[in-house]
Each structure stands twice: as structure tokens, then as C-alpha cells.
Amino acid sequence: MFLTHLTLSHFRSHRLARLDLDARPVAIYGPNGAGKTNLIEAVSLFSPGRGMRRASAQDMARRPEALGWKISGIINSAGDAREVAFSSENGAARQVFVDGKSVSQVALGQVARAVWLIPAMDRLWIEGADGRRRFLDRLVLSFFPDHAGASLEYEKAMRERNRLLKEQVRDAHWYKVLEDRMAKAGTVIHQNRLHTLNRLREAQNAALTPFPVADLELEQSEGTMPATEADLLEAFQESRFRDLAAGRTLVGPHRSDLYGVFSAKGVPASECSTGEQKALLISLILANARALSEDIGATPILLLDEVAAHLDSGRRAALYDEICALGAQAWMTGTGPELFAELGPRAQYLEVTDEDGLSAVNLVC
């Protein structure tokens, strides 16, 4: 799965950029602030969701013009080429088009998949559970494009239930419909997460590179997560008294956390060194790509922002070997071409420069 053409118009710092590409990895270099990350953010929009920065359409518009923006590209997957385009005007939610027809985000997942690693994730193991759930659900979404729909349904019903709890409504009839919806969507969310963790475990164990294996488990802030829809519904009903006292829902998949252990050392990821934590994250992203390649018959696009900055030359070489073995079009950013020396002719190179807040992209080779 790879982009053969990409056009950006008035997107972030890019007034206009046109790129013709092949299936090789894309090494992007240039000074800080030149617009490298903006470029791969545009690529992240080809996958379902809000993109790697989770930004609003309005925030993506180039300033000061704020004219709206457009991104288009041709995705090639298993020999099938599809034209995909996104646009937003006056800060409105972005529209998605595939081969000229308007489609939903879920439908986009049938055309393209992308997984990414950005510097903001480096503190994943030592920060709050919310960030780890978002990270896990992003991986889940790559396997199950409809996971976002289940999550939205669950969150919407839970907000309504929480409103009733805060208002101290005690009539069970007000809760029944909401808890039915939450139990149905919540079970889908939980099962999707378990399936994804299992696939990641299998894919990590199949790796041939020196990146460490992470033992992964789902934990609850308290108790255990009910395995079936009926059990989850019963848990909501039984917890209603405690939830009324707390003013919020205390059980369910929104209370799950991703727990990781550096397998070879038996050390929790949260206690590993910064370098080890980064290596564990890279291992998970590579495992995600490897498992998806097996499941859908096409390797997803990889977006690795500043991935080489904290890796020594040996581990960089291992990362690039793994990417090339996967046949992945990995978009990688760095401050200089020396960070990609181990790739040699196996990659195509883009230099991004900036002049007075306007980015320019040049294909070097």
C-alpha cells in the first residue's frame, strides 16, 4: 500500500506541493520548523480518523490566508489504484472523496491504512491511561475500521448516562436504553482490543530484528472487564449505586489501560530507560504493520516522525532493514540526510525548506 502521487494546497505551511512517488520508503529531511511533520500529517489523513495530530479542519488551514485547504493523492494497494481527496472550506469539517464520490471515514478504511509514531508518544508508558487507550485504539482502528463507530456510540451513550448520574436521577427506566447501547458497543470495543493485542503478540514474536518484544495486557482501573454483552450490562446495573455517588460511570472499556512489560528483562515498560521505551514503541508499530500485511494482504503506510533521532546507527539500520523487508512505504522525518545513510538507494529523499513561513518540498533522488 503506497502513495504514487500527493498534492497539498494551502495545508499548514505548504501553499502548494506536488509529489510523484514510488513504493520505496520516503526519507524527509530539513531544519526544524520547515514543515516536515506537516507533510506526513497530510498523509495520515488518508487513514480513518482525525489524523496524527487530532487537529480540527480549521487548524489545518494555512495562515494567514485561511482559505480552506485540499489534499489529494493516488493510493495503490495490491495493484488497485484509487484517487482519494480531502477538502475543507471556511473551517468546515473535512469532506472525503474516493474516485470522485463522497464517502465516510469508515469507507476510507477499505482504501487505505496508515499507522504512525510521533514524538508525543515517547512518554506513553509513563503518562496517564487516557493516552495509552488512544494509542491502543489507533492500532485497533487499523484492523477494524468500524471501531471508531463503536467508540463514538459508547461515548455518546455514556455522556447521557453520566448526565443522569450527576442529576441524581434514580428511575431505572431512564438508564435501561443507554446501558443497553453501552453494553453492546462496549463489548465490541473490548473484543476488538483483545484481538489486536493478540495479533501484536504474534507479530512481535515473528520479528527478525533486535527490537525488543513487549508483553501486553489490558488492565482495569478496578476489577475486571466483563467478557460478554450480558455481563457488561449486568455490571452497569450493579454499579449504578456507586456511579450515582461518584457522578460518573466507573465500569466499562473506558476504564481499561494498556500495560506493557519489556519481555526479555521482565521489567515494566514504565520503568525502562527512555531508549528502551522508544524501542518498545517502534517494535509495536512494526508488529502492527506486519500483522496488517498478513491480514489484509497489503502493508500499511508507516509514518515515523523523528524516529531516528534517538537511535544509534545499528538500531537505525535494523529499523530500515525491517521496513524494507515489509515492503512498506514508510514516511520518515529527520533534520539531516545522514540520519538515513543506512537506507542508501532503497529510499527516495525529500528535502523540505522554509522561507518566511512558506514550505517548499524538493525531490532529491
Image (cartoon, rainbow, N blue to C red):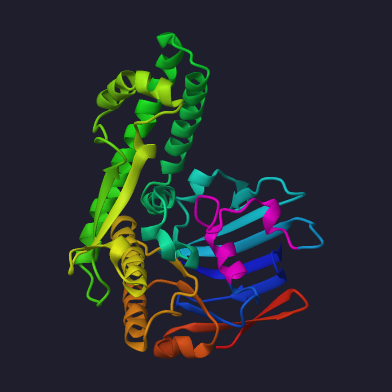
Q: Residue at x 74, y 63 (%)?
A: 62
Where residue 184 sits, quadrant-wise, is top left
Q: Which one is in front, 290 or 229?
A: 229
Where residue 243 sits, quadrant-wise, is top left
- Looking at the rendering, the stretch of residues picked out in magenta corresponds to 37-62
Q: Residue at x 59, y 76 (%)?
A: 20
Residue 54 lies in the magenta stretch: yes
Residue 21 vertical position relative to residue 235 in the rendered view, above or below: below
Residue 63 vertical position relative to residue 218 in the rendered view, above or below: below
Residue 121 lies in the magenta stretch: no
Where residue 288 sits, quadrant-wise, is bottom left
Q: Position of residue 35 (x, y in %)?
A: 64, 73
Q: Residue at x 18, y 69 (%)?
A: 265
Residue 196 vertical position relative to residue 151 in the rendered view, above or below: below
Whether residue 146 is visible, yes or no, is no
Q: Residue at x 25, y 71 (%)?
A: 212
Q: Position of residue 84 (x, y in %)?
A: 58, 57
Query: In the displayed structure, does residue 291 sit left or right of residue 49?
Result: left
Q: Position of residue 334 (x, y in %)?
A: 52, 80
Query: In the displayed structure, does residue 154 sit left or right of residue 200?
Result: right
Where does the C terminus fall, quadrant-wise? bottom right
